[in-house]
Structure formats: structure tokens, C-alpha cells
């Protein structure tokens, strides 16, 4: 599935002033029995949003009107740590989220974001505290990928980093598998030929189970 | 003269198909483990694009995450098989994996077959896991296989689809961290305690962006099971890659496995594998040293694996943390939040905390060595009446081996349930889960909120510590119960 291109995104940001929001919090494991990628937003943060009886947890940020379907999330350190489940990213996407701002990210989650058109932006220390306060005040956040700039009225513009080819892929909404096949098919075949000569035990792997 | 290289650098360099800007590369992937929960959307992506597996024989599929761990009751309908699954969604997911494996000609270890088990237990057992290879899986604990000197890491479903179609992945080269373990592990202290102490030392994101190599005499002395436990939990410090240099212990483990090279080819492989260790003067971006000689059993108290204490320690007091801790307000806030979720009082000793459940198993501690460690504490004792205790071997082969040694008898006489292999109460996707407020002494790897069931409370510890907690009904130093 091709991700939606990301050029410039603006909107409200949900403040989540907490460290270690792991992917079990973002998408609890029991919903992983669903085998689709679509419609997962209703289970995002399920155990934060709802009590066991299904009633809403009053005051939780995603239950507060302006923050219920945010384009941005501003969080503490280590957002998306833990399990590799890509459902965490698909659920955020389904809520409408396109940008996550955090002090640091779980690495697998970070990669999963890039593969799905969600932009992870690292902002640390007092700068992020300022963004958190502005999110709480319902400021409009703007992320511009071509210039790699995050702009929020009330704060200095923030330049963010992204690897060149990841940026290009996000701008165009390219599918990574398509890219690898189109650009590197010959390199892969050459690699395999060389590896099979040097490490023949890897070719073939043996009798299938 | 060549620049000295780390083990990580050698593995990386040997798999670069094409170097890309900004430290990225297209990396060749030698092996891929596939389970029922993270793979359906990857197979769907292949189908949508009309793609096939580039090398089907390099993958191995198995159902582990959502499978039931209870055997069929006596008198149950034989048509439901030896391991009936009551949950229609889980049953559907297992059936979908079987159908996908068949459609894409992917080797599949059947649910009731001899190679079923947790992906990270059967990879090594079958010889799929080999030194010098790259191994991926849609599971963050793929770090486990780094114990063999393999570059192994967890990936998402979209990345899985790319690996299936191309045997490649775009990756960014990590920085390196060497964790040197000195001194000998004291009796009653195990690799799990080392892993917990390491995570507590560097923090839950302390190794993010780094490939961690565990090194030093204490690692050389470790069994493969212990090394796997150690590498398994590297991800709990944020590192996607844990590594141990392959050595004689590794080669002895690999020899004779179904998918491992044999005879002359094994000799040739071992000669290559011997070249992989970090060069003596290789430079790491970060160095951490842990002295194991004074290490004591560790227990997690909070909702992040970094929130871990020595068993003799006391819970933090958020009121004090604010003044002295480097991350002051945030650390105090996180500690207060975790104490509230865990239902624990600030400043109290962690030992003595009563538990309701005990779980032995998982890709961290579900191997035969782990079961032996727990059984040594349980022999001649019985589980406290207030505790429900289950032991879930990591694989069918582990279960058989344990039964051959009579470990099942020890667990059963002690009042543990002896289950079929699977992830079980580590991920709580089947019916092995906590109810709100339950408190579990667990050999698993994550104490996240709701990890073992919504509202459940997890204390991570070693197999010996879980066994000790099970028989005393509370968190206790297992060393007092050892022979």
C-alpha cells in the first residue's frame, strides 16, 4: 500500500506529556488479532481512553474535543518504544495523525512511521516543553517537509533532520518495495552470487520444515 | 593496515548491497522468522502488488503469539486437535498464517509439530540462526539471535513485505556500545539479573540508536541460553541490536542443527565465523562496564523495564526524586505514575510485596536452562495457595527435553500448570492473562501497563526469583531458597 505523500501538514497537536509511551499503550496487544490495516484508530490508546466497561475516561487528552482527532502529537521521551507492531502507526494514521514530536523514538516505530507517511520529529528539552504548552493552548502546528521546518505561532521555527532518501520517498509517497525492485535488482543479484561463493552454506537453507 | 572494526561493523559491511546517503544502506537479509500476528498485513501487501517470495527457503513461519497453551481436555472432540483454540480471531489468524505459508511456499513449523515454539527459541533450535547472518522478524525481541553473532533486529510488517519480495531492507547504520561484563556471576544470580541491571543502568532509551555488544570474561563464560537472555533484553534499553561474538560455545550449539552447515561446510563456516569478533583495538562510540561479582537478583517495580531495583532495594519516593535526580521533574512524574499504576507505596521495600500470579516462560526465559533454574528452587516445595502459577516452555523441543529430565514432575508437584509452548502471558494475546489488579512475578521482558492483561501488574525477574515468589507468595530473594 502506498503511503500518502507528505509535503506540508498543519493542525492541532495533542499534548502527551509523558515518557515511554510504548506501542502497547498506543495499540494494546489484544487488538492485534485483527488482520487488517484499516479502521484501527478506534483501538488507539484504548486503555487510556476507555474504562473496562467501555465508558470514556474523562479528561484524557484524546477524549477532549479539540484533541480527539489530532494531526500532531507532542510527547515526552522514548515514544513508540517496545513492540514492533506496525498497528501502532496504522492506528495513529487512522486517527488523522501525520506528525509525532518527541524527545526520542523507539527505533522500529520510527522506521514504521517513515514507511507510512508519518513524520517523526525529534525535539528535546525546553524547546519541547514550549511546544507542549502551545499544544495545550490549541496552537496550530505546521510541518513543512521540503524546508524541514516545524513552525508554531509563539515559538521560534525549528529545523528538523531527516535522511535524504527517506525525505524524497515521503514527499512522493513512494512504496519502498517498489523502489528497491526498480533501483537495485541488479545489485541484489550480484550480491547473492558473491555471497553464495563465499558462504555456500547459506544457499540453500536445507530441507523445509 | 586495515582499520580495526567492531563485530557490528563486520556484520554490516558483509551485508551492504548498496551504500546510500546519510549512513543508510540497502542491507541484504539472510533469514526471516515469521509469526501469525505481525505477518498478515505483510502477506496482504505482497498479494496486492502481485509479488512472490524472492527466496522462500530463507523464511520460517510459526504460530506462537496468540496460540492457546492448554492441551485438549480428556474426552474433548478429537476433531479440535490436541490444542483446541476457543478464540475465533486467534483461530483465524493461525489459519491465515498456514494459508499464507502454503500460498507463498514458505516453510511452516506446524502448530502440533516438533518445531513449534516461540520464534526466538526455534530459530536457534532449528539452526536457522547462524553466526555472521542477518536475521529479521516482525518482533522486537529479534535481538535474541544476536547472541550468535548475527545481526538480528525487529521490523514492522511493511518492512517484512520488502524482505519477502527483495531479501533486502534499507537501514541506517547504528552507533556502537560495548558493555563489558567483568567478574563472575555469584550463585543464584543469572543472566536475567544482568539484563535487568543493564537496563536499569542505562535507562529504557539509554541504548537507542546503538548496536550493543556484550563482551568480557563473564560473557565468554555464559551458555548460549544466558547470552540469548542478555541479548533479548537489549531492546528494553532501546537498542534494536544486541550482540555477542561467536566462539566455541556458539559453534558447539550450532553443530548438528537441522539448518546448520555440516562436515566440511561447517569447518569452512566456522573458519569464517572466527573472523567476526571485534578487533582488539576497535573503537566503540560508547563503553559501559558492569561488574558482576557483587550483582544481586533484580526486580522491576514500575511500568518501564528501566524501573528496576535490586531485590533488597526500596521503591523510589517521587517527592525526593525531584531534588536529586538528573531528569528531576520528569523522572519524579514518571515514578509517581508508575507507583500509582502498580499500586505500590513510595519508599517501601520491594521485597515482601505479595503476588497473585507466577509466570515462567517467554523468549527471554523459556529455555531448558531457565526451567532447570526454576525447578532447583521448586523441588520439594509447593506454590503458595494465593498464587496461580504457570510454566510455558519456549518450544516443543524444550518441553520434550524438560519432560525427559523430569522437570515437568517437579513443576506439577509444586502446583505449577505445565503448558504447551507459546508466548502466553508475556504478551497476553491468548487466554493466559491477568485481570485488573493482579500482580505477577514474571520471567518475561516487559512490565508495560497492561502488557499481561489490562490493569495487570508485572514484576520482571529471573526464573529462580519467580519460583521463589511463587512458593512464598511474595517477592523474595531467591538465594535464601537455593540448595
Image (cartoon, grey):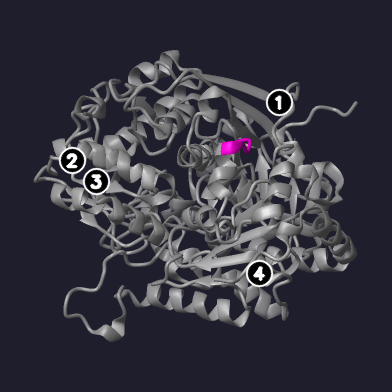
Our reading of the magenta stretch's main secondary structure is: loop
Mark 4 in CB contact with mark 2 (< 8 angstroms): no
Image height of B299 relative to B123, above or below: above
Q: Give neighbour class at mark 1: few <14, some 14-19, many 20+ (Cα, 10 Å).
A: some
x 38%, y 29%: residue: B308
In space, the residues marked 4 and 1 are separated at their CA atoms by 35 Å
Q: Is residue B388 above or below residue B210?
A: below
Question: CA–CA distance between discs 3 and 4?
Answer: 39 Å
Between the C-alphas of marks 1 and 2, the distance is 45 Å
Residue that numbered label 3 is attached to:
B358
Chain of the residue displaying label 3: B
Marks 3 and 1 close (CB-CB < 8 Å): no
Residues at marks 3 and 2, common chain? yes
Tell us which disc is closer to us: 3 or 4.
4
User: Considering only order in the chain, which callout, 2 or 3, is on the residue closer to the N terminus?
Assistant: 3
| Count of numbered circles on the image | 4
Read off the residue under disc 2.
Answer: B379
Callouts 4 and 2 in the same chain: yes
What distance separates the C-alpha of mark 4 from that of mark 2? 43 Å
Label 3 vs 1, first from the N-terminus: 1
> What residue sits 48% from the left and 66% below the top?
B37
- Indicate the secondary structure of the residue bearing disc 2: loop
**Residue at far top of view:** B324
Q: In the figure, is residue B146 to the left or right of B319?
A: right
Q: Please state which of residues A177 and B383 is positioned toward the viewer in this rendering.
A: B383
Q: Which residues are magenta?
A: B244-248
Q: Mark 4 — residue?
A: B57
Disc assigned to residue B284: 1
Amino acid at each position: 500500500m502506498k503511503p500518502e505523500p507528505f509535503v506540508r501538514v498543519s493542525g492541532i497537536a495533542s499534548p502527551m506529556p509523558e515518557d515511554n509511551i510504548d506501542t502497547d499503550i498506543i495499540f494494546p496487544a489484544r487488538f492485534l488479532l485483527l488482520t487488517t490495516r484499516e479502521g484501527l484508530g478506534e483501538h488507539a490508546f484504548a486503555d487510556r481512553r476507555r474504562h473496562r466497561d467501555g465508558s470514556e475516561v474523562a479528561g484524557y487528552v484524546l477524549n477532549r474535543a479539540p484533541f480527539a482527532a489530532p494531526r500532531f502529537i507532542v510527547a515526552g521521551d522514548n515514544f513508540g518504544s517496545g513492540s514492533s507492531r506496525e498497528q501502532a502507526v496504522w492506528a495513529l494514521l487512522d486517527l488523522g495523525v501525520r506528525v509525532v514530536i518527541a524527545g526520542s523514538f523507539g527505533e522500529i516505530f520510527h522506521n514504521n512511521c517513515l514507511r507510512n507517511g508519518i513524520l517523526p520529529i525529534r525535539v528535546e528539552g525546553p524547546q519541547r516543553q514550549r511546544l507542549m504548552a502551545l499544544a495545550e493552548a490549541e496552537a496550530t502546528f505546521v510541518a513543512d517537509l521540503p524546508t524541514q521546518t516545524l513552525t508554531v505561532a509563539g515559538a521560534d521555527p525549528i529545523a528538523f533532520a531527516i535522511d535524504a532518501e527517506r525525505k524524497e520517498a515521503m514527499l512522493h509517497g513512494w512504496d519502498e518495495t517498489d523502489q528497491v525492485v526498480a533501483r537495485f535488482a541488479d545489485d541484489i543479484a550480484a550480491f547473492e552470487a558473491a555471497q553464495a561463493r563465499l558462504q555456500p552454506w547459506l544457499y540453500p537453507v536445507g530441507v523445509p520444515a | 593496515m586495515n582499520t580495526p572494526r567492531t563485530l557490528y561493523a563486520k556484520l554490516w559491511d558483509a551485508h551492504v548491497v548498496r551504500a546510500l546517503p546519510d549512513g543508510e544502506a540497502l542491507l541484504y537479509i539472510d533469514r526471516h522468522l515469521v509469526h501469525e500476528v505481525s505477518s498478515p498485513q505483510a502477506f496482504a501487501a505482497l498479494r496486492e502488488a502481485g509479488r512472490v517470495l524472492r527466496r522462500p527457503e530463507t523464511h520460517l513461519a510459526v504460530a506462537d503469539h496468540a496460540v492457546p497453551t492448554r492441551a485438549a481436555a480428556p474426552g474433548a472432540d478429537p476433531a479440535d486437535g490436541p490444542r483446541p483454540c476457543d478464540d475465533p480471531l486467534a483461530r483465524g489468524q493461525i489459519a491465515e498464517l498456514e494459508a499464507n505459508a502454503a500460498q507463498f511456499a514458505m516453510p511452516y513449523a506446524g502448530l502440533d509439530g516438533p518445531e513449534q515454539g516461540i520464534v526466538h527459541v526455534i530459530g536457534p533450535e532449528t539452526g536457522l540462526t547462524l553466526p555472521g547472518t542477518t536475521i529479521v522478524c516482525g518482533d522486537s525481541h529479534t535481538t535474541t539471535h544476536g547472541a550468535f553473532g548475527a545481526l538480528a533486529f525487529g521490523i514492522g510488517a511493511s518492512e517484512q513485505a520488502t524482505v519477502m519480495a527483495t531479501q533486502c531492507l534499507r537501514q541506517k547504520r547504528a552507533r556502537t556500545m560495548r558493555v563489558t561484563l567483568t567478574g563472575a556471576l555469584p550463585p543464584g544470580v543469572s543472566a536475567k539479573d544482568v539484563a535487568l541491571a543493564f537496563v536499569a543502568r542505562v535507562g529504557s532509551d539509554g541504548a537507542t540508536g546503538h548496536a550493543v555488544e556484550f563482551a568480557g570474561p563473564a560473557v565468554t563464560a555464559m551458555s548460549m541460553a544466558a547470552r540469548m537472555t542478555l541479548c533479548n533484553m537489549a531492546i528494553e534499553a532501546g537498542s534494536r541490536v544486541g550482540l555477542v561474538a561467536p566462539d566455541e560455545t556458539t559453534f558447539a550449539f550450532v553443530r548438528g542443527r537441522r539448518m546448520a552447515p555440516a562436515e566440511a561446510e561447517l569447518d569452512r563456516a566456522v573458519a569464517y565465523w572466527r573472523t567476526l569478533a571485534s578487533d582488539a583495538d576497535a573503537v566503540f562510540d560508547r563503553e559501559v562496564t558492569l561488574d558482576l561479582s557483587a550483582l544481586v537478583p533484580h526486580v522491576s517495580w514500575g511500568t518501564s523495564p528501566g524501573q528496576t531495583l535490586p531485590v533488597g532495594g526500596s521503591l523510589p519516593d517521587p517527592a525526593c526524586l525531584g531534588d536529586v535526580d538528573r531528569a528531576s521533574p520528569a523522572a519524579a512524574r514518571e515514578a509517581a505514575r508508575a507507583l500509582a499504576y502498580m499500586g505500590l507505596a513510595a519508599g517501601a521495600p520491594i521485597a515482601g510485596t505479595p503476588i497473585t500470579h507466577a509466570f515462567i516462560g517467554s523468549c527471554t526465559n523459556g529455555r531448558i536452562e531457565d526451567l532447570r533454574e526454576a525447578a532447583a528452587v521448586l523441588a520439594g516445595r509447593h506454590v503458595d495457595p494465593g498464587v496461580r502459577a504457570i510454566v510455558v516452555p519456549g518450544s516443543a523441543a524444550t518441553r520434550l527435553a524438560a519432560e525427559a529430565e523430569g522437570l515437568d514432575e517437579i513443576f506439577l508437584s509444586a502446583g505449577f500448570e505445565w503448558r504447551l509452548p507459546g508466548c502466553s502471558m508475556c504478551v497476553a494475546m491468548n487466554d493466559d492473562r491477568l485481570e485488573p489488579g493482579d500482580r505477577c512475578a514474571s520471567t518475561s521482558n516487559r512490565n508495560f501497563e497492561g502488557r499481561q492483561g489490562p490493569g495487570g501488574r508485572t514484576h520482571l525477574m529471573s526464573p529462580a526469583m519467580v519460583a521463589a515468589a511463587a512458593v512464598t507468595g511474595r517477592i523474595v530473594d531467591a538465594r535464601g531458597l537455593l540448595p
